[in-house]
Amino acid sequence: MLTPVCCKQAAPAHRNTHREVRPHTHFAKEQGSFCFCTCFLTGCYYPFFVLPSNVFTACSFVDEIRDENPRKTTISAENEVEAQKLANNYKFGFRKWKSHVTERPFEDRSNIVKELYSELNVIKPYSVGSLFTCGNVLYVFLFGWWIALVYVLVGLLMFLTVFGIPYAKLCWKLSCYFLWPFGKSIEKASVSVAAYSVKILQDNSNLEAEEDGKPSSPLLLPTPVGETIEEPTERPQNDHYWWRVSTYIWLLVGYPLLAITHSVLCLISWMLVFTIPVAKMSTKTLHTILLIPPEHVHISQATETQEHESRVILCCYHAVNLYYYKYTVDGINVFAVNLLLLVIVSLVIGYVDKSNEFVSSEVKFATAVSSIIPLSYYIGMGIASISAQSNFAVGAVVNATFGSITELTFYITALVRGHHQGNKCLQEIVKAALTGTLLGCILFIPGICMIIGGLRHSEQRFNSRSAGVSSSLLFISVGGVFAPTLFSKAYGNLVCEDCTNSTGTNSSGSFTPLVYTISILLPVSYIIGLIFTLKTHSHIYDIHVGDGTGHLGASVHWSRWRALLILIVATVLMSACADLTTEHIQPILSHSSISQYFIGVTVLAMVPEIPEIVNGVQFALQNTISLSFEVGSCIAVQVCMIQIPILVLFNIFYDVGFVLIFSDLHLWASIFSVIVVNYIFMDGKSDYFQGTALVVVYLILLALYYFAPSPSGC
């Protein structure tokens, strides 16, 4: 009997790519004692010297080798802190985070990103293209016409003061500028010294003196007799600027009106994000251009490169830049910064207008729920920052505690309010939100990531073994959470005080110990999963930090103490928003024709997870689909193994009537979802068709909830 020769030996070029050499039994061709298996990379046949009876054994032998050597994941980052954050993304129980927690070297960033942070004071006439773009035309209709009109009116006002005529002329010039500022530059005109004459002798001698082998200054070259030369010199503002009457008239009459106008313009354009260049232009005008002497302001067409670009104060070519969604402020995405205003508005109208005289309950509910989105972002950023700068134990504790704080805050607030009001409907809403989070994380998040990633990359591969660990924990989690519900189906209604099963025996006494037992076993399983994936079997993920990672000191956006402070503040604000949400949800539940189940599994379940969905989509676009799957799996496992046991524990110390029994629809929808997603994950590859299947299943389940009758008591 001849010894089998594996593809690794037959194809030395692919020696280290066990995943790529894939024998297919239906392609194997038996020729005497030879078996040919095809290479996945080249499509070539490689021989196996084997007896005919062992053809399929040899192919299975290579398959086992491939499975025992999962694909290695190599991490390369700018610094060690960033590498630690990326490594945490692959760890079980750690929140997956896409954004940087350290400052990236500006010189290493793309030209598109560098353009976002420019000061709008560079003249570049040959590289901007046409100025008649849709964004610039939109600027005229949104901002340009009324800004120009304000400048005309302020100019008339300054003209009537007589002393402010110079500023009136400035306002009229700026009126024309802001109507169409593109391709124009505002410069601070230089002040020239007195002109003087230089007389040169009329001779044919060479006057080009050289010093140290270098030509002398051009001022020493032959110049016609009587030519006047002016030497421009940069000087600060006129010394008599603050002694003028016109200055104080301008600061008391004209400047305040324009300050209000530019403040409104800056706020609107900043909130729209993509028009941030307009906000920059407005800010620079307000604190620079309007505070220098009017005779020093010079407006011209930016068609030629200026000799002294340092004199250029403002030069804008485009009002809209679609890449501003990448813009960050101290490491925080601009959308999260802008949505903080929504949090403030939500708290003000919620706690000031208690009687709903000015704002309805529906508006308060919508603003309170939407406020959870930026707060979830800040909590995620804080968790990622602390984990990246800490060891494994600290990172695991922070992720286990603060990772579920968003959902737990809402659940506990709703249960307490429902208990005080004697309203069992809020308890059903909490259960619907728990189930909706499970369904969204199991079906929707992986599905939408598969679709978007599959449209950009035809097929994406992932480590099926590591995905199998998450799938196993999902089975344990869902089985444990719904075990009391299955128990109640088998032995009768366990909520009543005197329950009998089909045999006529009392079974109510078995319910409470069962719930407590499950609430203990689930967190224990979570801890075992942490130890298994992060300590004893960490080779499953095979994370390797590449040599390209820098080892210099990283400049983090948030230190550990700052991140902890932000976590605490965001948690307090989250509690306030959750309180407002539960307070103003009742009118919606009472007057809405939509099933309360549907509201729970959609709005209340998925809105807090929007930052996680964005992270998952970004991972999929970067062809790391495994992280997209881990985003949903991590949340689903935490719901079952941490959040629900904490709710049961909370009910022990503060009885709010929370009973761990779910409706039949919750039960079968969750079990069916786990079975479907495990079937999808088996082959270790994904495409947009599989993602579409998951999303369609999710939408079918939502349709069931939409048409389902409301729970009893609602």
Image: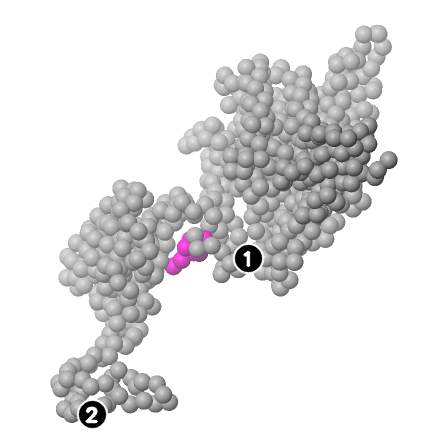
In the rendered view, tell whether residue 104 sits above or below residue 420. below
Colour option used: one colour
How far from the left and from the top, in percent, is residue 457? 54, 38
In the rendered view, tell whether residue 197 sits above or below residue 694. below
Q: Which residue is mark 2?
A: 205
**Which quadrant of the figure has residue 450?**
top right
On whether residue 90 falls in the magenta region, the answer is no
Helix, strand or loop at disc 1? Answer: loop
How far from the left and from the top, in percent, is residue 11? 70, 44
Label drawn at residue 480:
none
Magenta-drawn segment: 113-119
What whole-number distance in Å separates the C-alpha atoms at marks 2 and 1? 61 Å
Q: Is residue 430 visible?
A: no
How far from the left and from the top, in percent, is residue 124? 32, 59
Mark 2 or mark 1: name the one nearer the start of the chain. Answer: 1
Mark 2 is on which residue type? Answer: Ser
Mark 1 is on which residue type? Answer: Glu
Write the residue at 16% across / 92% down: 203
Write the residue at 27% across / 46% down: 132
Q: Nearer the viewer, residue 693 or 29?
A: 29
On whether residue 118 falls in the magenta region, the answer is yes
Write the residue at 81% across / 17% down: 508
Q: Which residue is mark 1?
A: 103
**Which quadrant of the figure has residue 122?**
bottom left
In the image, taking residue 181 as reference, residue 363 lies left or right, namely: right
Indicate which label's residue lies in the foreground, 2 or 1.
Answer: 2
**Which quadrant of the figure has residue 210?**
bottom left
